Image (cartoon, rainbow, N blue to C red):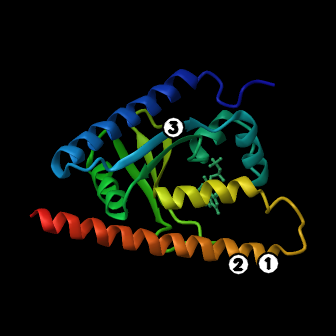
């Protein structure tokens, strides 16, 4: 079977590299201005052939390069993990203001968390060449929760206490969200002290 991305791999990788370089420039800019590095880490990935095919099948879409690249918008993904809530929103504003990529969609799962407690700020960007990139911006706490929740894979198993698991995971997500607000307050106190 031919790879779902056909001969687009090099151009897709170039798009990811271009966006990551842009984010690194914004990171340096913000670090210079505040003396705080806003980013904990950045991760860039191309969705694997197998998970893209699975997603297309789930959506009832044909398994073609066209669907994978231009109907789906998450073949390319960049995850930006920030220290503080304000860094997430400041980075969002700076990404939206640059001109290499256009914002085509945004979802604020921080202000409007998913029912299971998932939080992140999602942006879909389009490059000048027409490739889409899903950007996920989140704090370290949000990233920890998402990684552990994903790791548990409880959705695929049929465990008897599913309701309790979902409820407990939601409680953890809410506790972490409250810690994010407290950490932000502490940082603001430190910054105000300096001014
Ligand atoms: P991967 O391996 O990260 O690429 P859908 O993708 O069908 O669920 P949609 O509308 O395309 O829905 O996107 P949505 O729900 O806005 O966000 C998609 C991505 O956000 C997911 O990608 C995850 O990375 C992340 N995400 C969303 N909800 C959750 C959640 O409840 N838990 C965790 N851990 N991550 C979540 P993929 O394609 O699922 O996987």
Q: Which mark is residue 44?
A: 3
How far across and how far down the image is residue 78, in percent? 49, 43
As drawn, 42 above or below 59: above
Q: Which mark is residue 167?
A: 2
Quarter-of-image position of residue 69: top right
- The picture places residue 154, in percent across and down from the top left corner, at 79, 62
Query: Is the residue under label 2 in contact with that under label 1 (CB below 8 Å)?
Result: yes
> Residue at point 73% right, 47% down?
56
The Cα–Cα distance between marks 3 and 2, rounded to whole angstroms, is: 31 Å
- Identify the secondary structure beneath mark 2: helix
Between 103 and 44, the one nearer to me in the picture? 44
Which residue is pictured at 50% across the width and 25% down the height?
Answer: 11
* Crowd tier of the residue under label 3, counting other residues whose Cα lies within 10 Å: few below 14, some 14–19, many 20 or above: some
Helix, strand or loop at label 1? It is helix
Q: Is residue 115 visible?
A: no
Q: Which residue is mark 1?
A: 163
Quarter of the rendered image showing ligand 1? bottom right
């Amino acid at each position: 079977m031919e790879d779902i991305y056909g001969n687009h791999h090099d151009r897709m990788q170039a798009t990811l590299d271009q966006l990551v370089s842009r984010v690194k420039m914004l990171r340096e800019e913000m670090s210079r201005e505040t003396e705080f590095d806003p980013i904990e880490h950045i991760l860039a990935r191309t969705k694997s052939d197998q998970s893209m095919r699975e997603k297309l099948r789930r959506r009832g879409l044909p398994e073609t390069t066209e669907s994978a690249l231009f109907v789906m918008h998450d073949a390319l993904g960049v995850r930006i993990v920030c220290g503080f809530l304000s860094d997430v929103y400041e980075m969002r504003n700076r990404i939206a203001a640059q001109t290499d990529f256009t914002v085509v969609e945004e979802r604020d799962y921080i202000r409007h968390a998913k029912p299971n407690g998932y939080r992140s700020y999602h942006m879909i960007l389009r490059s000048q060449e027409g490739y889409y990139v899903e950007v996920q911006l989140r704090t370290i706490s949000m990233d920890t929760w998402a990684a552990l929740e994903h790791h548990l894979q409880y959705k695929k198993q049929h465990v008897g206490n599913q309701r309790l698991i979902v409820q407990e995971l939601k409680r953890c997500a809410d506790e972490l969200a409250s810690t994010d607000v407290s950490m932000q307050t502490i940082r603001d106190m430190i910054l105000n002290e300096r001014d």
